[in-house]
Image (cartoon, rainbow, N blue to C red):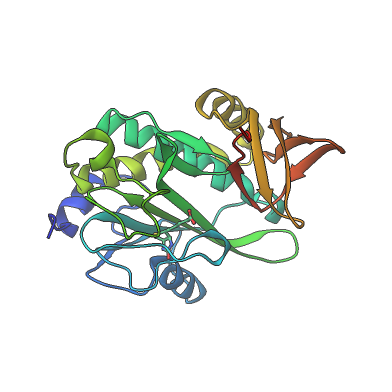
Amino acid sequence: MGETLDLDVLQKSLAGTIFDGKLHLFPSIESTNTHAMQEAAKGAPHGSVYIAEEQTAGRGRGDHAWHSEPYSGIYVSILLRPQLAAADGLWLSLATGLAVQRAIENVTGLVTDIRWPNDLLSNGKKVGGILVEMNAEASRIRHAVIGIGINVNQRQFPAELRSQATSLRLEAGRGIERRDLLIEILRCLQKEIDSLIQPESFASACLEILGRLERKSTWIRGKQVFVDEAGGYTGVTAGLDEKGFLRVQTDDGVRRVLSGGVREQLAKG
Ligand code: BTN
């Protein structure tokens, strides 16, 4: 078994942040995202954080399961009540990807890639994923839950995941303290969120996110991809539009990826 997380240590390290006094740690839970959405419906406050040592039914994007080996990964969901229009939810996804990428680099020295919108990759394999779920009325977000899963100290993966998944331990060649990474993720996330959810800094925060993604992701331009949406199509990535959606140049013109997954289309040899 890997090291366990200590709620007191986490609370102290995050004193003064929006998460102060709002951390919840579970030895085992179905899914921190499911729990956070339930707590949100009951009125839990902005900045509540739900962390688990193990998930028995971890969920990924597109109805996939999220493999959640006990004490090896980070499984955390953050509840936000942002002043954002429902149509602007994508910014939370993009900002979280950048926050997690920065936190991983700060703690481990590993430079990960971001596969739009927010998969964290190392040497082409997935080391982290983000699932943002929202409850919105016609125009405004009531609450959003940002779920983050990071493969930290896994030494191996089930056979069906081995070709696509890796862990920070496998990439760095040494064990990584989950506590340090979790604290850094939450600190980096707060920085991103602070400017995004203030109406006066929203527009500049979006521009900044677009610029950073261009620099910090190899997937934004010139990547030959298959898009798992609208029956599936292929093309070459051609930047982000002003709303943060990925543009893909296809034989029939430029298309915008709205919600589907993107994967690399290797040239047939
Ligand atoms: C993906 O890449 O498909 C997103 C994976 C998100 C996994 C995290 S782990 C914590 C939170 N709880 C869940 O059930 N899912 C997210």
Residue 100 visible in rendering: yes
For image coordinates 23% across by 64% down, the residue present is 70
Q: Position of residue 218 (x, y in %)?
A: 54, 28
Q: Quadrant of the N terminus?
A: bottom left
| Foreground residue among 13 and 104 | 104
Displayed-image quarter of ligand 1: bottom left
Look at the picture and state if 23 lies above or below 113.
Answer: below
| Foreground residue among 155 and 205 | 155
Q: Position of residue 91 (x, y in %)?
A: 60, 44
For image coordinates 40% across by 40% down, the residue present is 100
**Res 142 quadrant in image:** bottom right
**Res 127 quadrant in image:** top left
Q: Position of residue 55 (x, y in %)?
A: 32, 69
Q: Is residue 61 left or right of residue 74?
A: right
Residue 193 visible in rendering: no
Q: Quadrant of the C terminus?
A: top right
| Foreground residue among 120 and 224 | 224
**Res 239 quadrant in image:** top right
Q: Is residue 3 left or right of residue 192?
A: left
Instruction: Identify the residue at the far right of this view.
Output: 252
Q: Is residue 235 left or right of residue 180?
A: right
